[in-house]
Structures are given as structure tokens and as C-alpha cells.
Amino acid sequence: MNTMNIRRIVSPSDPLYAGCVKIYEESFPYDERRDTAVMTQMLSDDRLHFIVFYGDREEDGPVGFFTFWDFGRGYLYGEHFAVDPSRRGGGTGTKVLDYIKSMGIPMILEIEMPSEEDEMTLRRKLFYERNGFILNPHSHIQPAYHPDSEPVPMRVMTWPYVFSSEEYEQFRKDQLGIMPEE
């Protein structure tokens, strides 16, 4: 991929949206993602930024996507970030993070608990660390996305500094405000 184009998706009729949904459903376990219909409805929420990235031609489909929330409180919450598995390892993820970081707004995101038993969780943590994110000490549980699922223990990483307890608590309140009703 010589060129990487990045733009926001605001409607499910966007020609790249269906490809992003496929990557979303393949990349995140049920307990770590919204119901697709709910996510589609949330595209109309101005606080949600659904960013798609693709190569030279839209017709070739999305390379991946990044969803983040801007609650107007001086930070961004990176909720979901995935690259098509067949296109990983080529620096695309770093380019996307560079694009997001170029906004100059601190960011918080969740990662699975890093574990020696699961190499992928360690690789994700190292990827974010290579891109300037810092593992935070805050105890964090991702709220349940579905009535039939459980909350998921996670860790939070932030850029460009460790969030204070007050900043983390504000994020937590904001996050709970966008989660499905139980």
C-alpha cells in the first residue's frame, strides 16, 4: 500500500462501512465489542469518530478502522482499533496512531490483561508502548457490552502521559455514559 487515506465514516451507507464491520466482528470477541446494530446507530453521535483507513482505491476496501470518542473534556477515548489481519505488520497501525496523535489531544485506550500465556496480549501492549503509550496503574473493568455478557478486566494505556486518578475517574464516568443499559 503506497498511499494511506484516512477519513471519517458518519453513515452506514458509506461504501467502506460494511468492510469495517467485518474486520470489527472478526477482530474483537463478543464480550469486547458492541452489537453491530448499536454501533451503527451510534454513528450519528457527534462525539464518536469512526475513522476508516484504506489504500489507493476505496474499491479495494478498508485496511482497518479506529473508533474514538471525544467527550469535550481534553482527552480522546480510543474504543476500538483493528487492522485487517491479512494486512498487519506493514506499519499501518503506527501510521494511524501517528495520525490520531497529531491532533495533540491526550488519549486513553483499553487493552486485554497482558499475559505470558497469551502472546497476542503481550504483542499488543508492546505495539502501543512502541507508539508512545504508557501502561497505567488504574484498576479497570470494561463494562459489559451485552446483557448476556460479563464485564471484562482490562488495563488502560494513555498517551502522552499517565492519567491522574482524577482524569481516570472522569474517563470512567464518560465511558459508563456510552455503554448499553443493563
Image: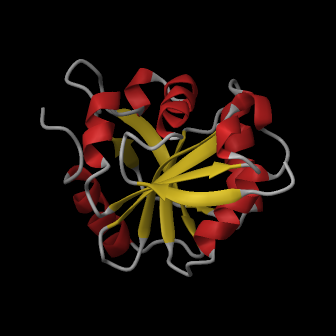
Give me the residue at 25% from left, 41% from top. 41
**Left or right: residue 65 compared with residue 57:** left
- Is residue 125 visible in the rendered image? The answer is yes
Picture quadrant where residue 36 is located: top left
Is 161 drawn above or below residue 36 in the view shown? below
Check the image and tell me how it is coloured.
secondary structure
Quarter the C terminus occupies: top left
Is 107 drawn above or below residue 150 in the view shown? below
View extreme (top): residue: 148
Give me the residue at 36% from left, 47% from top. 11
Q: Residue 115's x, y, as percent?
A: 65, 33
Give me the residue at 31% from left, 32% from top. 151
Q: In this view of the protein, which residue sits in the foreground, 139 or 56?
A: 56
Give me the residue at 53% from left, 36% from top. 20
Q: In this view of the protein, which residue sits in the foreground, 130 or 164?
A: 130
**Left or right: residue 116 compared with residue 71:** right
Is 137 drawn above or below residue 178 in the view shown? below
Q: Residue 8's x, y, as percent?
A: 48, 58
